[in-house]
Amino acid sequence: MDTLQPEREEQRLTERQRMVLRLLVREYVVSGRPVGSKTLAEQFPVSVSSATIRNDLAALEHVGFVQQPHTSGGRIPTDQGYRYYVHHLMGSPELSSGDQIMIRHQFRQVEAQLDSWVDFAAEVLAETAGNVSIVTAPRSMVARLRHFEMISLQPRLALLILVTQESAVRQMMLHLPEDADQATLSRLTDVMVPMVRGLRAEDVESQIVGATELPAYVLEQIAIGLRGMGSVEHTQIRHSGLENILGQPEFAGAAGHNVLELLRGSALLGALLPQMSVGHEVQVFIGDENPADALRHFGVVMATYGIDGEVTGILGVLGPTRMSYWRSISSVRYMARLMSDLMEDLYSSS
Amino acid sequence: MDTLQPEREEQRLTERQRMVLRLLVREYVVSGRPVGSKTLAEQFPVSVSSATIRNDLAALEHVGFVQQPHTSGGRIPTDQGYRYYVHHLMGSPELSSGDQIMIRHQFRQVEAQLDSWVDFAAEVLAETAGNVSIVTAPRSMVARLRHFEMISLQPRLALLILVTQESAVRQMMLHLPEDADQATLSRLTDVMVPMVRGLRAEDVESQIVGATELPAYVLEQIAIGLRGMGSVEHTQIRHSGLENILGQPEFAGAAGHNVLELLRGSALLGALLPQMSVGHEVQVFIGDENPADALRHFGVVMATYGIDGEVTGILGVLGPTRMSYWRSISSVRYMARLMSDLMEDLYSSS
DNA sequence: GTTAGCACTCGTCGGCAGAGAGTGCTAACA
DNA sequence: TGTTAGCACTCTCTGCCGACGAGTGCTAAC
């Protein structure tokens, strides 16, 4: 085990104590109940007595890696214990190549349907990680228009379709100040498209006040649309896999309610977004490490995907602190890579 | 009470017995626990003894409208009892004008954002009805193409955007057999659009085999897209308001799991769709009346919305059999009307 | 440093009695 | 004949008690 030693506690742990912690975390993750010395002794690769384990457990408790909920009845890992486990004991999380192939294959099948990508990614991630998944659609910091289209619905009503640089499509309704048929709209579009290509919401707005003959009502609606596509507030979170965690004992009562509350509002995104570092490294927040109070009893594994500086989305997993971090981290890492690759195809700076 | 008399039991019920049933249903809906004769006697508008109520309860039990889960401990309505209540005792469900105005106002605010309509409708409906809401996007039986657009992403990759008669938009990826720049694609689009306008998936496919010079790979993808937009299997259900029912005692244990399972798969739609009558009347399924076994313990209130024969969607509410049918029916009815009105604007046969 | 043994703690589970809510039935009453 | 008061009965719910067992810390021996 040749890891760096950022914490001094690590120095104090013997090899066997590390093994005890590793086994304890694994056992607790699957059983959900406090683990006793006898159970651990049985799972030990080399024969060792339960009394020995008890001594090690006492040492681990002393440095704050495990705790006992009740005087009798086994130990559970603390948040700090999980952290040590994830950083030093877990091994490198890499999805089995079988899983990788399966996921890639599934994605190939829906590749053409762009609309359902985000939903689909959420579903796959939830299933692979065995927890609740969270996915946001890819966003650019500043949405730039690539193309738009107007389709006549009624004399004074049109459908406005915006396409941005990163291939995001948005449909809006456009009320017209005067009657206009499809031919008129098409002609207008042909004139306008070259003039607004590559512009941001601000640019379009300045066009309105600037000396231009382009109709303001179209530009206004385009600006509104672009603004909505670039802003964080309007970012929707797609999630999947609720069934994976609502059945678990941790979320039996009111806590299950909290999860739903969390996923519904924008609080989750607001809390996590500032924490996301640039680059696509997977980030892990365990228990009290979490930025938001509401997440205090959760484990969160997140990563960004996309093309740095151009268009990015967030993708992650939410579960009880007692979750399989290995599964979650490996899943998130792989999915982020996969989505980034797909983004490459979609984004063109032309 | 001048209702029709389809059932003969109704004839047997005295006015007071009907009042007893009405009060019992109302009380049970809010409390969730069996209701006793004493409680009912206290709520009676005119002074009446609990013994009298007991006689009436016995009569109601005899005709199958109420039952006692245990020998002692109050009565609860049977599915049949609910049915009688909904059809004869509930009064006409009409949302308060305050609620109507509020909803209409909220909708006006997001009117322009077509993409989020369905999600938004689901949220509003869930909140108004206080249960889980279900909404499908509007679909036409046969999707007809109105317009399409190709946007060059890479030399051999394009974004294909389809717009149907009912203003549904779909984005797909299109692999090109040879290099093509935006100008080439635009020229191709200009030629093709007039030739495929108004066509169905089958029509487009027959174009492929027919003597045409239009590139088959574009037509193929368009056909695939149109097929997906018209078919029932690909219809996605949006839902909202899980938090409204998962907290309730009925769904505390494994039953809550069932709800999630139900909403995830396509089983729900498959079961309900055949039951939907034409026209936009609200339909109510209570308990064992439900088409699917999995819904045996639910109450379902549904309606179609849209333009008959052209483009329709489904919108409804799912809750425990013990739910406020008044709230749900009035909400569903109003939302269906509202969505139909909005559809009128979007759909043009031009 | 490891292990066996032992006394101790404390949560879980089954049984049991008492309280309370609700019922059906009967007899009296308007 | 319909309504009401009273009563004995049933059954659930709650709290209490004790047995059981899993797990612990400590000590002494290896």
Image: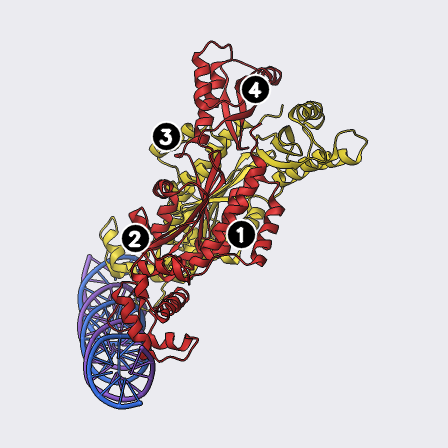
Chain colours: A red, B yellow, C purple, D blue
Q: Whole-Å distance between the Cαs marked 1 and 3?
A: 35 Å
- Residues at discs 4 and 3 in contact (Cβ within 8 Å): no
Please give the residue where the numbered disc 4 appears in the rendered image.
A193
Residue holding disc 3:
B101
Please indicate, yes or no, whether residue A111 appears anywhere in the rendered image.
Answer: yes
Q: Is residue C18 left or right of residue A86?
A: left
Residue at mark 2: chain = A
Q: Choose between C21 and A129: the one closer to the eye.
A: A129
In the image, residue A56 sits, relative to residue B323, either above or below, namely below
Q: Amino acid at mark 2?
A: Asp
The alpha-carbon separation of the residues under discs 4 and 1 comes to 42 Å
Residue that label 2 marks: A288
3 or 2: mark nearer the eye:
2
**Quarter-of-image position of residue B179:** top right
**Residue B151's x, y, as percent?**
62, 29
**Disc 1 with disc 2 on a shared chain:** no
| The one of B320 and A194 positioned closer to us in this rendering | A194
Q: Circle 3 — which element?
A: helix
Mark 1 or mark 2, whichever is nearer to me? 2
Give the labeled residue for mark 1. B265
What residue type is disc 4 on? Val
Earlier sequence position, callout 1 versus callout 3: 3
| Chain letter of disc 4 in the image | A
